[in-house]
Image (tube, grey):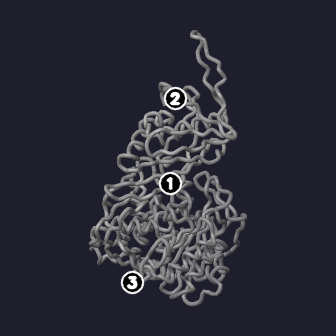
Amino acid sequence: MGNRRRVAERRKTRPAVIGGVIAVVVGGAGFGAYALFGGGAAADDGSRASSDEKPKVKTGPLSAAEVTTTARAFLTAWQSGKVPQAAAATDEAAAATSLLTGYTKDARVKDVTLTPGKPTGDKVPFSVKGTVAYKNTEKPLAYESALTIVRRTSDGKPLVDWHSAVVHPDLKDGDKLVTGEAGTPPVKALDRDGGELTKQKYASLGPVLDGLREKYGKEAGGKAGIELRVVRGKSAKSDDLSDKTLLELSKGTPGTVKTTLDPALQAAAEKQVAKKAKSSVAVMRASTGEILAAANASPGFNTAFQGSLAPGSTMKVITASLLLDKGLASADKKHPCPKYFTYGHWKFQNDDKFEIKNGTFKASFARSCNTAFISQAPKLKDDDLTKQAQQVFGLGMNNWAIGVPSFDGAVPVQSAAQMGASLIGQGGVRMNPLNMASVSATVKAGTFHQPYLVSPDVDGRKLAKASRTMPAGTLSQLRELMSYTAAYGTAAEAMSGVGGDVGAKTGSAEVDGQKKPNGWFTAYRGDLAAAGVVQQGGHGGETAGPIVAALLKMGS
């Protein structure tokens, strides 16, 4: 950022020092006093550069005094309603001015009290209390936030590192806070049996309920209430984030939307993900595409529907169908599984550098041999895997309409080593649990059925279709591979005790910067198909596998 003029503010009274703590009293109606940090703030060293000397630019780590003094200046100005001074204490004055002005004008927050917590390095947590007032309606507001102090490179001045989340942690840059009549009426979401779905009952469903309201609020015939809400900007909307209600001042009249969720499966899914940090799972009916459950250990983001993660070896279900289609593999015929295979100048290897000598393709699939798949890369075109994923499994075309925001998977056309990596679910391939549950569902049903949470009969939307189905020979062999893996391969331990017509595939996806890979598991039992991921969990059979298996045991 460029240089800014330093604004000096006269203080009519000196701060009172009580017990070593500076108590800053902020003037203005409705604003209280608060204590900022222990021990006070260090004074300037008093040195000044002479007129013919170039001022030194301070560098290096921020001192505790710089952190506390800068945070104090920002919070004091914000609480006092002095937006220009608060914005000047940040490294993005224009953006800060806009959002802080809107905090009073658009969000209608008054009587603000800001109470800082104990700094940790350059980060300062603080609590916010205020009142949201709209016409004759008022309601208290309270939440926690934090700010970070950085040093401006041009002159070394410490400033608040500006992001919209400083004002409220639910804000993304470009979002704003607005209080007024909700743009969309509330909805009463029901499960398939007519029971009400709430965040209190099902912690994971917050983003789903927000998405249902955004899409069906007006269509369902409800009446808007008065709310403080996050209105998403362009960048957040491009990530499929819905507007979010933060505070309800007066209730609207909700419309009713029925979903396909099964209450027993949803409750079980919530319990399962609560056992594993960073876990997500999705369950669907293979023959119809109805989504029966979706849950996330981190309820703030719907990874089950919107996650974009490398699926690791669960992708081998799609790759295997491609190799079987092209006659490059056959379930019971011998297939190479060497320790290493080099393609596109990359040397690929198997987990623990194992090899299978004189083994079949079924054995390679069951043990998840990477080189068995990458060894076929020289015989494939760059777009073969992409076409297989799109045309047979309905993935990666950005045309799913499930009823709430979702990511439809991505299998981009790649070449050389990246194409080889894509065959084993790395490279540019990206999926989420719903995508991979759909893959197992396609294998079980024999054809792709787009997953959906709200019946298309509600709003007449069209569901995505696949342009072709697998040949009967490919389909029967693929089912054989997944069944064998569930009984004798890497999925056997997790699927132990899951009876009936079953199939499964495990996966582990390496991610840069993670000590442990993301663990994946996709499977079907009867007419149920499910998939899960545990980020940074390790092997999928040990982490995501038990979650998926527990849910498959509940029905068929």
Residue with the mark numbered 2? 12
Q: Residues within 10 Å of mark 3 (few under 14, many from 20)?
A: some
To which quarter of the image does residue 81 belong? top left
- Under mark 3, the amino acid is Gly
Q: Residues within 10 Å of mark 1 (few under 14, many from 20)?
A: some
Question: Horizontally, is 266 left or right of 61 in the view?
Answer: left
Dividing the picture into quadrants, the one containing residue 15 is top right
Residue 100, relative to residue 447: is it above or below?
Answer: above
Which of discs 1 and 2 lies nearer the camera? The answer is 2
Label 3 sits on a secondary structure element that is: loop
Amino acid at the residue labelled 1: Ser
Label 2 vs label 3: CA separation?
Answer: 64 Å
Say whether residue 76 is visible: yes
Does residue 61 appear left or right of residue 382 in this picture? right
Residue topped by disc 1? 415
Q: Are marks 1 and 2 in contact (CB under 8 Å)?
A: no
Of all residues, the one furthest to the bottom in this rendering is 500
Of all residues, the one furthest to the top in this rendering is: 52
Mark with earlier residue (2, 3) = 2
Spot occupied by residue 266 in the image (x, y as percentages of width and height): 50, 78
Query: Which numbered disc, 1 or 3, marks the residue closer to the eye?
Result: 3
Residue at x-position 55% and y-position 73%: 329
Q: Is residue 296 depicted above or below 471 in this figure?
A: above
- In the depicted structure, whether residue 399 falls above or below residue 65: below
Residue behind mark 3: 194
Please give the name of the residue rendered at 65% of the width and 47% of the height, measured from the top-left corner.
118
Amino acid marked by disc 2: Lys
Which sits in the foreground, 430 or 317?
430
Where's residue 301, x and y in %? Answer: 50, 62
Give 447 or 83, whichever is nearer the viewer.
83
